[in-house]
Amino acid sequence: QVQLVESGGGLVQAGGSLRLSCAASGRTFSNYDMGWFRQAPGKEREFVAAISWSGVNTYYADSVKGRFTISRDNAKNTVYLQMNSLKPEDTAVYLCAPKRPYGSYYDTNEYDYWGQGTQVTVSS
């Protein structure tokens, strides 16, 4: 089992920034690639960003490339999502999850043990 606690969400104006954190426990965190996803009301959960277990490789959805940065601190069992230049369309619940081995970084079905998420609301 793994427990994930996301934090750092909130209400921000368009153009602003937020830094999300995802604290993990219950597994050897450093063994797992990790991903951030988001889900807006009435929409499918969508990939945002992912990072390899070492932190060397990162992956982004086209919609956030150049604005969001994913990072991790294995000593703290935490993965981060720095979000800059936020837009109203970024409004969603943001969730993190560990990726199963060998699967695609971009495929939601390759992730399990979802946290509760943290709400991000961007006003125009």
Image (cartoon, helix red, strand yellow):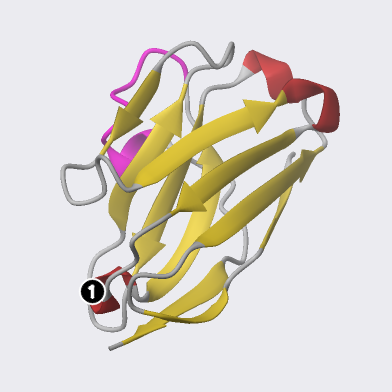
As rendered, which of 45 and 6 lies closer to the eye?
6
Residue at 49% x, 11% y: name it: 56
Q: Which stretch did the figure color magenta? A: 101-110
Could you say which quadrant of the image residue 71 lies in? top right
**What predominant SS class does the magenta segment belong to?**
loop
Circle 1: is it few (<14), some (14-19), or many (20+) Cα within 10 Å? few
Residue at 51% x, 57% y: name it: 95
* Outermost residue toward the left in this view: 62
In terms of secondary structure, where does tag 1 sit? helix
Residue 75 pos. (x, y %): 83, 23
Could you say which quadrant of the image residue 83 lies in? bottom left
As rendered, which of 75 and 122 lies closer to the eye?
122
**According to the image, label 1 marks what residue?**
89
The answer to whether residue 103 is above or below residue 69 is: above
Q: Is residue 28 visible?
A: no
Residue 17 pos. (x, y %): 48, 63
